[in-house]
Image (cartoon, rainbow, N blue to C red):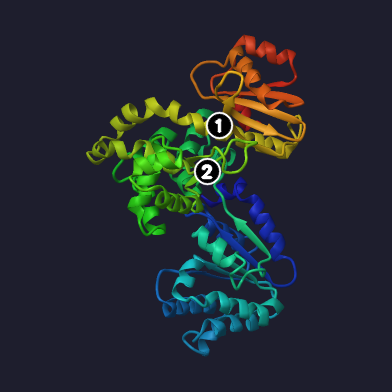
Amino acid sequence: MDNLFFSQGRKRELTAMERSFNRPGFKFAVIYGRRRVGKTSLIAEFIREGNKKAIYYMATEQNDGANLKDFSEAVFELYPSGRAIADGFLTWDKAFEYIAAQAAGENIVVAIDEFPYLAGANKAISSILQRRIDLTLSKTNIMLILCGSSMSFMENQVLGYKSPLYGRRSEQYKITPLDYYDSAEFFAGAAVEQKLIGYAVTGGIPQYLNIIGRYKTVTEGIRESFFDKFGSLYEEPQNLLKQELREPAVYNTIIASIANGASKLNEIATKSGEDNSKCGKYIKGLISLGIIEKETPIGTAKGRNGVYRLKDNMYRFWYRFVPENLSNIESGKSEHVYDKKVAPFLPEYMGHIFEDVCKQYMIRQNANGSLPFVFDAIGRWWGNNPVLKREEEIDLVAVSKDAAIFGECKWRNEKAGVEILDDLKRKAVLFKAQNAYYYIFSKSGFSDALKASASKDGGISLIGLNDLFNS
């Protein structure tokens, strides 16, 4: 997995970390992101490149004394002479004081993975580290890395202004899922459509991509991983919720409500059976975990007319198809479930995800300078048409001060026709953009009439599935 994972997906992070490591002086990096996103692999690859001297320790849910003892062993692996002094350090302060003395002027990495577990067992660890950074570590060439999967903890207790460590970090890396383009590398040899489906069920999480990518086909990987009772992703969301949350049953109900169409707070509360204020608190927790998000129409004041949706595609896929098929899955009917209960509904499921893919494509093109202008914001739009007095929606809008791109994204088994362009132009008038451009994305190609319109008008772009990978 690692060579594939790092061939594209984390090249920027690795380059930035390497550049930091080679600078003289003390460095303090904070790495965080959801579980399975590849944080530990990133650290391991960073240490492996150049065969760096390193102390790596992954904290576990145990008491402080046990964590300190295990950390001492990690220190002695790099500096074995320390064992002559004692079996382990008596305090964390002594451990870091010893590391600083041994490192002298050399560049080494000290990485503590799953730091929230360490902090859970020792509430003073951040203050201890802060003191040791100020007194001795700051005078070394050590690169200290604190890594964690609890994003709310890392953002508030490590990066937050109330943290003792606030202001001491030299860099931070929020590790996010891979986009559709990098995810496709896990499905070498698969058709483009299958690569996108693979992304749509894994959400770009490297561990899930690796699981599905091991099978002969994407279809087989999905069927065996999600719809076999022994499959590695069959119970994955439930296991993650139990690890992260105190009341997984309530969160489970809220996620299921959103997966089944509820998008406003009152709708989610009604479907889940919770009152609005309690439901809002749970939703806030799910947003902090990156499982759901609140989306607002582009160009609209923050929070106004917003809707909640599942941000994590693995959760979205699992909650859409697994719960309603539990009996058949448990009885070993994985092929029946996939062929009859999943495959016929994949086009509908892919609709919104294809919009996300097209948005990612536009972001890549924007970074490459390949668009008619550099946009400042991109998103979906929905709202009231005051002329026709009805709700309208545009799949994709990218705007700058005086220009806009309007896009439609069609995942269906028929060619996109000129009527789609005409309808898009009609809706785009609502924005009154000085310079308007139109992008039509289509899974199944374009009609001759639409191709003719595009050939005559340089402001119209037609993007097929293969084009998504040719940028």
Residue 108 found in image quarter: bottom right
Q: Confirm whether residue 181 shows in the render.
A: yes
- 352 to the left or right of 102: left
Q: Identify the amino acid type marked 2.
A: Lys
Secondary structure beneath dot 2 equals: strand
Question: Which residue shows up at 53% across the image and 36% down it?
Answer: 188
Secondary structure at numbered mark 1: helix
Between residues 368 and 382, which one lies in front from this camera angle?
A: 382
At which x and y percent is residue 16? 69, 57
- The structure residue drawn at horizontal position 45% and vertical position 46%, both measured from the top left corner, is 208
Q: Is residue 246 above or below residue 82?
A: above
Q: Residue furthest left?
A: 331
- Neighbourhood count class around disc 1 (C-alpha, 10 Å): few under 14, some 14–19, many 20 upward: many
* Amino acid type of the residue tagged 1 in the rendering: Glu
Counting from the top left corner in percent of width and height, residue 449 is at 63, 9
Q: Quadrant of the C terminus?
A: top right
**Disc 2: which residue:** 294
- Could you give the CA–CA distance between mark 1 and mark 2, rounded to whole angstroms? 16 Å
Where is residue 291 drawn, in percent x and y?
A: 47, 47
Q: Which residue is mark 1?
A: 355
Residue visible at 72% across and 65% down? 22
Q: Where residue 397 sits in the image (x, y, percent)?
A: 64, 31
Disc ID at residue 397: none
Q: In this view of the protein, which residue sits in the foreground, 125 or 15? A: 125
- Of the two numbered discs 1 and 2 on the same chain, state the one appearing first in sequence: 2
